[in-house]
Image (cartoon, helix red, strand yellow):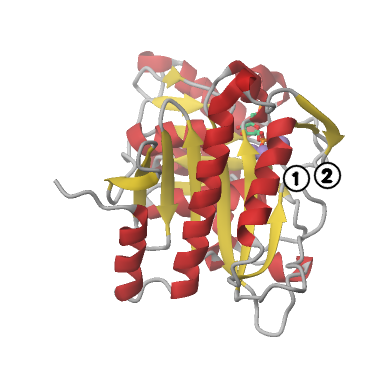
């Protein structure tokens, strides 16, 4: 069987007119940066990549060394190619302006450079998530330019650094999966048109927050836990890796629902996950794979962002389950 590399896949898309040459270049550069991150991750204690960086980020989190390293790798790889008007990251308070000596392009790149930071030091799967928008005409890559709903994304993807490194990508034309061939140094197409199974028996939520959940989530999870004799009529299983990339990757491959609801502790905080770096790209991928993604009330992709680091409640995965928990929120109003 002849192998199809990421480059060949992207060239085919370009020739078919579904992506521009610049978007192809952008995705290639992001993939190259992810290879470098994958390499750093795999060094573990043998490289200077574990532990705390000793700094904090705008999210109020203590940064790990790998959060900072991954952010730098992505910035350095993407700043000089001429395809970007700006970059925004979970780890930076303000958008990164393309240095004056480099050409400017038409796209905006957003990323969560290292997702699942709490798993770095224990050798559990982590990842990188990215999203691409067009820079509105006449705008520089300032915060205002980034504040577009997820429906405007032209590409989104993630890399999971697990037993294998895999890249999952959509440009609005289905979801494709690539596995990193470490000997050749290239991503090889290993999954075409990924589709999430519509029905499932698996859910993912941090159960330790149960006492803080609001009524619709209490009701929904209560019904899943009731098992065969309850209203849902089947036994459910639970998984929680605590790396969104790894949890979503499992769901993409075998179905399920991923939840990070808003809860009663956070009157001013609608959930933990970030709309622009986590929820939007994952929602785009999940919808392209035939699944659904809401914040309990509306489609995540239709939320008009007000701030770059805005947080949002997330329910995504198999359609049937997302519809159920969304209905409980809507009827609770
Ligand atoms: P990040 O490491 O990029 O800050 O994201 C962590 C997120 C997400 O990956 C995961 O689903 C969630 O936080 C885990 O939260 P809990 O620690 O509350 O389980
Ligand atoms: Mn973080
Ligand atoms: Mn994250
Ligand atoms: Mn992160």
Give the number of the disc on residue 231: none
On the image, which quarter does residue 134 sit in?
Answer: bottom right
In the image, the residue with mark 1 has its CB under 8 Å from the nearest atom of ligand 4: yes
Residue 205 showing in the rendered view: no
Q: How many marks?
A: 2
Q: Residue furthest left?
A: 1
Picture coordinates of residue 86, whole percent (x, y):
69, 66
Q: Where's ligand 4: which quadrant?
A: top right
- As measured in the structure, the alpha-carbon distance from the residue carrying label 2 to the one carrying label 1 is 7 Å
Nearest to N terminus: mark 2 or mark 1: 2
At mark 2, the secondary structure is loop
At x 71% / y 71%, what residue is drawn? Answer: 145
Residue 50, above or below 5: above
Give the number of the disc on residue 58: 2
User: Are the residues tagged 2 and 1 within 8 Å (C-beta)?
Assistant: yes
Picture coordinates of residue 320, whole percent (x, y):
39, 40
Asked whether, in this view, residue 164 is left or right of residue 246, the answer is: left
In the image, the residue with mark 2 has its CB under 8 Å from the nearest atom of ligand 2: no
Asked whether, in this view, residue 331 is left or right of residue 232, the answer is: right
At x 78% / y 42%, what residue is drawn? Answer: 269
User: Which residue is more in the foreground, 189 or 270?
Assistant: 189
Query: 10 Å neighbourhood of mark 1: few (<14), some, or many (≥20)?
Result: many
| Residue that label 1 marks | 91
User: Which residue is more in the foreground, 299 or 45?
Assistant: 45
């Amino acid at each position: 069987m002849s192998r199809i590399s990421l480059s060949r896949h992207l060239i085919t898309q370009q020739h078919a007119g579904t992506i521009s040459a610049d978007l192809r270049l952008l995705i290639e550069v992001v993939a190259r940066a992810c290879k470098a991150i994958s390499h750093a991750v795999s060094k573990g204690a043998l490289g200077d990549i574990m532990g705390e960086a000793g700094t904090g980020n705008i999210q109020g989190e203590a940064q790990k060394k790998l959060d900072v390293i991954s952010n730098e790798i992505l910035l350095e790889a993407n700043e000089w190619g001429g395809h970007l008007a700006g970059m925004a990251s979970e780890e930076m308070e303000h958008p990164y302006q393309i240095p004056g000596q480099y050409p400017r392009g038409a796209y905006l790149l957003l990323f969560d450079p290292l997702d699942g930071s709490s798993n770095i030091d224990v050798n559990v799967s982590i990842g990188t998530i990215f999203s691409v928008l067009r820079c509105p005409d006449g705008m520089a890559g300032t915060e205002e330019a980034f504040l577009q709903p997820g429906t405007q994304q032209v590409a989104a993807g993630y890399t999971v650094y697990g037993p294998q490194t895999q890249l999952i990508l959509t440009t609005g034309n289905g979801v494709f999966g690539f596995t990193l061939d470490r000997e050749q140094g290239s991503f090889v197409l290993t999954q075409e048109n990924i589709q999430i199974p519509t029905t499932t028996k698996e859910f993912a939520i941090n159960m330790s927050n149960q006492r803080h959940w609001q009524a619709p989530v209490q009701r929904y999870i209560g019904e899943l836990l009731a098992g065969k004799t309850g209203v849902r009529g089947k036994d459910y299983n639970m998984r929680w890796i605590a790396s969104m990339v790894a949890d979503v990757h499992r769901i993409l491959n075998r179905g399920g629902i991923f939840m990070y609801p808003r809860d009663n502790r956070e009157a001013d905080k609608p959930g933990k996950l970030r709309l622009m770096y986590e929820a939007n790209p994952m929602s785009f991928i999940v919808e392209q794979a035939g699944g659904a993604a809401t914040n309990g009330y509306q489609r995540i992709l239709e939320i008009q962002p007000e701030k770059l680091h805005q947080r949002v409640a997330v329910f995504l995965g198999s359609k049937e389950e997302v519809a159920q928990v969304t209905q409980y929120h809507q009827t609770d109003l």
